[in-house]
Image (cartoon, rainbow, N blue to C red):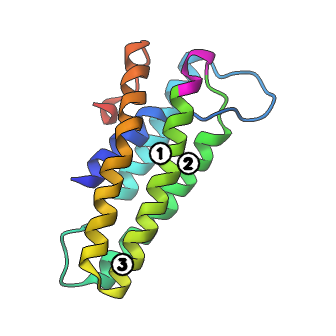
Amino acid sequence: MVLAAVIAIAAAGCGGGGGGGGDRLSKSEYEQEMSSIGKDLQTASSGIDLTNTNDLGKVADSVAAFKKELEAAANKVDDLNPPADAEEETGKIADALHAFAGEFGKMEEAARKGNLADLQKAQQAVITEGTEAQKAAQALKDKGYNIGDLGS
């Protein structure tokens, strides 16, 4: 399902492109931040059911709530200062989270208009946009980062 891919990607890389001038996070701190943001997204996603096409208003409401969580996660990622060897991948994941939030916005709009074709199109875009983020998450794993169960 689309949500599982988004959550896995989000949880895998939560750590952004450089929160200001402070010290970089240690590997352990970075892993803790990733896990925390990923868990928040997992919790937020539990209320979404994109298969309930009989009540698109309810779908739109749940998608809107998750979009807010994605935006919050993306902003947290942007504010982190990851270890140097995780910076590139972290940036890619931050970009993906922002893109996911945009696509969930499109899903919300389509659901509110009752446009199933556009809803499905936005879902597909999430999957497509997730490819680079999945590569980045795997690269973090390959570097020895423990990104938790959601990254698998």
Residue at x-position 67% and y-position 40%: 79
- Asked if residue 82 is positioned above or below residue 16 in the image, the reply reads above
Question: How many numbered markers are drawn?
Answer: 3
Whether 35 is among the magenta residues is: no
> Quick check: can you spot residue 24?
yes
Tell me if 109 is positioned left or right of 30 in this view. Answer: left
**Residue 39 x %, y %:** 41, 43
Label 1 close to label 2 by CB (< 8 Å): no
Which callout, 1 or 2, points to the residue nearer the camera?
A: 1
Q: Which residue is mark 1?
A: 96
Residue at x-position 45% and y-position 48%: 40
In this rendered view, identify the residue nearer to me: 105 or 29: 105
Could you tell which of marks 1 and 2 lies nearer the N-terminus? Answer: 2
Spatial separation of the CA atoms under disc 2 and disc 3: 23 Å
Whether 87 is among the magenta residues is: yes
Spatial separation of the CA atoms under disc 1 and disc 2: 8 Å
